[in-house]
Amino acid sequence: MKPSVAIAYRVYPGISKKPLYYPDNKLKLVTLGLKSLKQGLKGVNFHFYAILDQCPESYESVILKEMGEDNTTILQASPSGNEATFTQQIEILLNQDFSSSVYFAEDDYLYLPESFKKMLDFQKKFEKIDFITPYNHPDYLDYDFQKIKREKIDYENIQWMTVASTCLTFLTSKDVLKRTQQQLKTYTQGNPDAGMWLTLTHEHLFNPLKWIKFKKKDWDSFTFIAKAWQMSPIQILFQKKHLLWAPSPTLATHLESTRIASEVPWDQYAKKWMQEVEKEIQ
């Protein structure tokens, strides 16, 4: 039997930062990402919940074409905005009955083929998998804040490792999501994504001065720790540490041009998809 996953995907027509591809055309960027996502879902049963945040009708057409009308539910953001749509993702994934595996997706990622099967197989194989990011973030190597004592598991030609935090694209289960929704919702209350993750992974929270070398970047990171304690002191003290896993080599990349996961020749994958985008989006 194929593994299954319910995906809550949120899309906004504006462009933030500078993406590696289509920095001036969000519809083409979204189409490119969806083409890669569809390849990433090979061998997996899925249902795709698309949250449109102030998007023109062209976005709905692209999503239905790429993901399939039978596999897709289109929803409008209510209310709109980054924090509101993240809350909407949580509610959608908790209330759906399609799958016990749930995935939070943003609109500016590229995926490798069959990446979801690899994540879902890993999730099913090992009990201590609370959260999975497909993105081996460059910060894990070059940012002191991310240099933690890691657990590692070698499985199916991937070295999975625990990490302190990630972005807002990740896989978990309905059971874990139900238990941790209050910590996740601190993001909607002013906690940055890194601070939100620290409320779950507990990294650095009990030894905040151990890794700081008194550089400006370190003090910026210290605010993540302060926010985590401010937002979730009870959960930090009385709920268990959760493990967040990342793959090496990566299975996906965020498309911010300065933060591309480096192990994959993304241009080789993107070239074919971009040719299709150019034919379809004028």
Image (cartoon, helix red, strand yellow):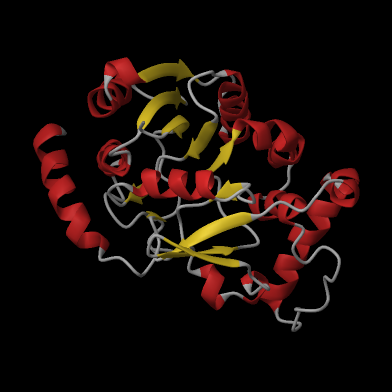
Q: Quadrant of the C terminus?
A: top left
Q: Is residue 83 left or right of residue 276?
A: right
**Residue name at image x 52 percent, y 34 percent:** 101
Q: Quadrant of residue 244?
A: bottom right
**Residue name at image x 48 percent, y 69 percent:** 138
Q: Is residue 274 left or right of residue 97?
A: left
- Whether residue 169 is visible, yes or no, is no
- Whether residue 49 is visible, yes or no, is yes
**Residue name at image x 26 percent, y 61 percent:** 266
**Which percent across, then down, holds residue 45?**
36, 29
**Which percent across, then down, holds residue 259?**
44, 64
**Which percent across, then down, holds residue 240?**
80, 49
Please state which of residues 82 and 180 is positioned toward the viewer in this rendering.
180
Please state which of residues 210 and 237 is positioned toward the viewer in this rendering.
237
**Which percent across, then down, holds residue 53?**
47, 26
Q: Quadrant of the N terminus?
A: top left
Residue extending farthest to the bottom is 213
Residue 257's place in the image compared with 270, above or below, is: below
Q: How many marks?
A: 0
Q: Is residue 128 left or right of residue 183?
A: left
**Residue name at image x 64 percent, y 77 percent:** 144
